[in-house]
Image (cartoon, rainbow, N blue to C red):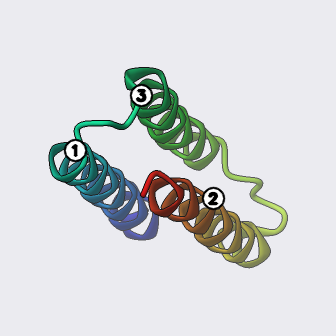
Amino acid sequence: MAKRRELKKAITKMCADLMIELMAAQQSNPNIPQEDIANIAESILLMQGDFTNRLNHVDKQQVDRFFEQIEEDLTVCTNEIVDHICQLF
């Protein structure tokens, strides 16, 4: 159970950090379209909700593989969002 709680906290912190980076990008370059900022912010929130929901429904047959898959997917999603933020410049 501690593993899920730790992952949920890590996901929340990671999403908060992504939002901070997004807002920093917006402040440093005011010419970025608001629609782009809104789309990236929405994808961050959807990612957080998706991973939190996935952690609430653990497959008890393959617990180790389940957590490995969550971490892999989280890394991929996070990298995609970081790439989108970097493309704003």
Q: Residue at x 18, y 53 (%)?
A: 28
Determine whether, in the image, residue 28 is placed left or right of residue 66: left
Q: Counting other residues with Cα less than 10 Å from the Cα at mark 2, is it few (<14), some (14-19), or many (20 or more)?
A: some
Q: Locate residue 59, reporting x and y percent.
A: 77, 54
What is the total number of numbered labels drawn onto the structure image?
A: 3
Q: Which mark is residue 45?
A: none
Tell me which label, 2 or 3, sits earlier in the chain: 3
Of the pair 81 and 86, the residue shown nearer to us: 86
Of the pair 76 and 82, the residue shown nearer to us: 82
Tag 2 and tag 3, C-beta contact below 8 Å: no
Q: Is residue 29 positioned above or below 89 on the image?
A: above
Quarter the N terminus occupies:
bottom left
Q: Counting other residues with Cα less than 10 Å from the Cα at mark 3, is it few (<14), some (14-19), or many (20 or more)?
A: few
**Mark 2 or 1, which is nearer the eye?**
1
Residue labelled with disc 2: 77
Residue labelled with disc 1: 23
Determine whether, in the image, residue 88 is placed left or right of residue 16: right
Q: Secondary structure at mark 3?
A: loop
Amino acid type, label 3:
Pro
- Give the alpha-carbon distance from disc 2 to disc 1, as whole Å: 19 Å
Q: Is residue 74 positioned above or below 38 on the image?
A: below
Q: Counting other residues with Cα less than 10 Å from the Cα at mark 1, is it few (<14), some (14-19), or many (20 or more)?
A: some
Q: Secondary structure at mark 1?
A: helix
Q: Residue at x 67, y 68 (%)?
A: 76
Tell me which label, 1 or 3, sits earlier in the chain: 1
Quarter the C terminus occupies:
bottom left
Residue labelled with disc 3: 33
Amino acid type, label 1:
Met
